[in-house]
């Protein structure tokens, strides 16, 4: 293994979409660049995990294998065997008004296929769980995970929809 990783630009990949493997790609560096310059990529990860843990309890977070990526972002790796065909790959995006370039930037992506580099590839590190024992989410956990991650979406339409939903809830109450 040392030979293959010494002085070469190579790594080991994990194929998504095979045997239920799913990956959530969290581009924490975009959060620190465009939304909170005082934050660190790790503090954004904590913010995301807090959202999951507070509402769904710790079981969901414990089922996620979490890896730090070379770019400073994170991967949530898990298995899910249900239908993913209707899930958008762009779960959360930083809206144009937050960027100097007036372009949207990825924040949280759902990877249905393709591959990601994994540990022991240089600069990739598993910080929770075990890549040899990737856990399976049930349908309720999967749906909650996807919906919770969508709440970080800062595109104008998504923000408007959330505000309207809050108004409707207040009227019902």
Image (tube, rainbow, N blue to C red):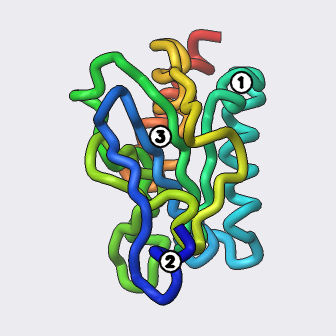
Which x, y percent locates residue 54? 77, 29
Read off the residue under disc 1. 55
Report the mark closest to the observer, 2 or 3.
Answer: 2
Viewer-side label of 1, 2:
2
Disc 3: which residue: 150
User: Callout 3: 10 Å neighbours few (<14), some, many (20+)?
Assistant: some
Total numbered labels placed on residues in the image: 3
Q: Distance between the Cα atoms at labels 2 and 3?
A: 42 Å
For image coordinates 61% across by 53% down, the residue present is 67
Residue that numbered label 2 is attached to: 3
- Image coords of residue 135 (percent x, y): 56, 26
Would residue 43 be visible to someone looking at this image?
Answer: yes
Please, what secondary structure does the residue beneath circle 1 have? helix
Q: Which one is earlier in the sequence, the residue at label 2 or at label 3?
A: 2
Q: Considering depth in this image, is 163 or 15 the residue closer to the camera?
A: 15
Give the residue drawn at x 52%, y 55%: 26
The answer to whether residue 155 is visible is no
- Tell which circle, 1 or 2, labels the residue nearer the N-terminal end: 2
**10 Å crowding of disc 2: few (<14), some (14-19), many (20+):** few
Q: Earlier in the sequence, mark 3 or mark 1?
A: 1
Residue 3 percent across, percent down from the top left: 50, 77
């Amino acid at each position: 293994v040392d030979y293959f990783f010494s002085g070469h630009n190579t790594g080991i990949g994990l194929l998504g979409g095979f045997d239920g493997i799913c990956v959530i790609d969290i581009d924490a560096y975009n959060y620190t660049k465009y939304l909170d310059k005082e934050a660190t990529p790790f503090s954004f990860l904590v913010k995301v995990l807090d959202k999951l843990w507070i509402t769904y309890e710790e079981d969901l977070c414990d089922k996620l294998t979490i890896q730090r990526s070379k770019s400073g972002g994170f991967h949530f790796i898990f298995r899910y065997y249900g239908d993913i065909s209707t899930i958008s790959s762009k779960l959360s995006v930083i809206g144009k008004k937050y960027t100097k370039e007036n372009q949207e930037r990825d924040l949280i992506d759902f990877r249905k296929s393709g591959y990601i580099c994994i540990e022991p590839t240089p600069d990739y590190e598993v910080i929770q769980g075990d890549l040899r024992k990737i856990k399976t989410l049930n349908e309720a956990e999967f749906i909650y995970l996807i919906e919770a991650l969508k709440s970080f979406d800062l595109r104008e339409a998504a923000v408007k929809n959330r505000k309207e939903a809050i108004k409707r809830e207040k009227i019902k109450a």
